[in-house]
Amino acid sequence: MSDNKIYLSGIKPTGTVHLGNYIGMLSQMRDISHEHKTVMFIADLHALNIMRDANAVREHTYEIAAIIMSMGFNMNNVLMFRQSDVPAVCELSTMLTNVTPKGLMDRAHSYKAAVDKNISAGNDTDLGVNMGLYTYPILMAADILLYNSDIVPVGADQKQHVEFARDIAGHFNTIYGNVFRLPEPQIMPDAGIIPGLDGRKMSKSYDNIIPLMAPSAELKKRIMRIITDSKTPDESKDPDESTIYMLYRHFATAAESADLAEKFRAGGMGYGTAKTILFEKLDSVLSPMRVQYEYLMANSNELDDALSNGAEIARRIADKTMTRVRHVMLGTKK
Ligand code: TRP
């Protein structure tokens, strides 16, 4: 391991994990886990501001755990657990509310986006906004601070949340002494927009995803549904405008990508052929993971064991943090 820094990331169990999640976040965290101590937790409490179906929360939680265990993380460096298995995060969150300026929450991008949407629709400003959404950044700060994280790798959309965690920790330390390590966001190398079946950003809300762990036949079906323009096989095509190529290059070697790009430009290859090439590449990369994934999903007791072992270690770390926090805030014994 190259240093002793703790890297932490959370993923919400709000939908089927798709290629966009894999390229944008999971594969990067996997690479980090080969170099650093890595905390990967499943943020089921954060999911609650939109999820209303407990069975779906549990199933998505299992899916994420099974994917993490199947996709080549260095599990010796990984602490994986379910957020709600460590209730101390709620306690810390309550405590942090007392040092968090309300104005900070008012400035949070996701809250502001909800408000702006309401205003432009002529609705009441806070229509549909629950307190889970409003205080989301505080719970996230609690995640980060509870486990003494140094680095929080995130996409650009989550950078503000990590900065808030750092601000909140700073306020806290100013009042109570040096209790928290100040976390830093690390913006993950931009993977660009990962297009979905219809060419828009791959997202559950557009219903255009390719599930990471779709069985072979479904994977093929989805890939064949990728929308293309109407160029004939003979015509030259721009690879960088093509969803097919944009997905391919994340799974192929540089040489393979250059080769496919050249075939696009040269003309003589139809989209059907290109889709077959994409399918074969994806299937060959994903099949070995899928075997392990399907095994774990069929043996969820193994997932339960892994999650509860992780939670036990996470609770021990959390206990130490909370002893310090209770001591400085409440005057309880160390
Ligand atoms: N907010 C993150 C997301 O939407 C998930 C998350 C929750 C998280 N807690 C975290 C990420 C702590 C990093 C650190 O993707």
Image (spheres, helix red, strand yellow):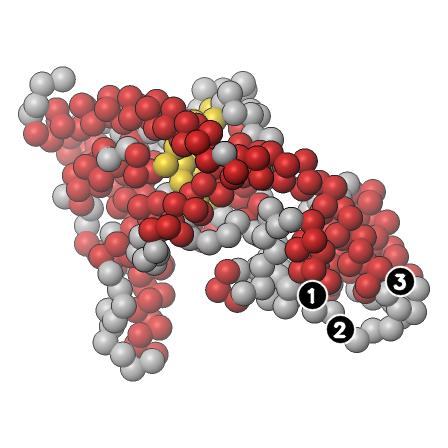
Asked if disc 1 and disc 3 are in contact, CB closer than 8 Å, the reply is no
Q: Residue at point 49% right, 43% down?
A: 63
Q: Which residue is mark 1?
A: 225
Q: CA distance from mark 2 to mark 3?
A: 14 Å
Seen from the viewer's position, the closer of residues 178 and 258 is 258
- For marks 1 and 2, give the CA distance: 12 Å
The residue singled out by tag 2 in the image is 229
Q: Amino acid at mark 1?
A: Arg
Q: Is mark 3 within 8 Å of ligand 1?
A: no
Q: For marks 1 and 3, give the CA distance.
A: 18 Å
Residue 79 at what x, y percent from top left? 43, 27
Residue extending furthest left? 331
**At label 2, which amino acid type do we have?**
Asp
Residue 288 placement: quadrant: top right
- Label 1: how many residues lie within 10 Å, few (<14), some (14-19) or many (20+)? few
Return the disc, 2 or 3, that comes first in the chain's sequence. Answer: 2
Q: Residue furthest bottom?
A: 122
Callout 2: SS? loop
Mark 1 or mark 3: name the one nearer the start of the chain. 1
**Left or right position of 169 against 65:** left
Residue at position x 81%, y 58% from top? 274
The image quarter containing residue 162 is top left
What residue is pinned by disc 3?
269
The one nearer the camera, 64 or 167, is: 64
The local secondary structure at tag 1 comes to loop
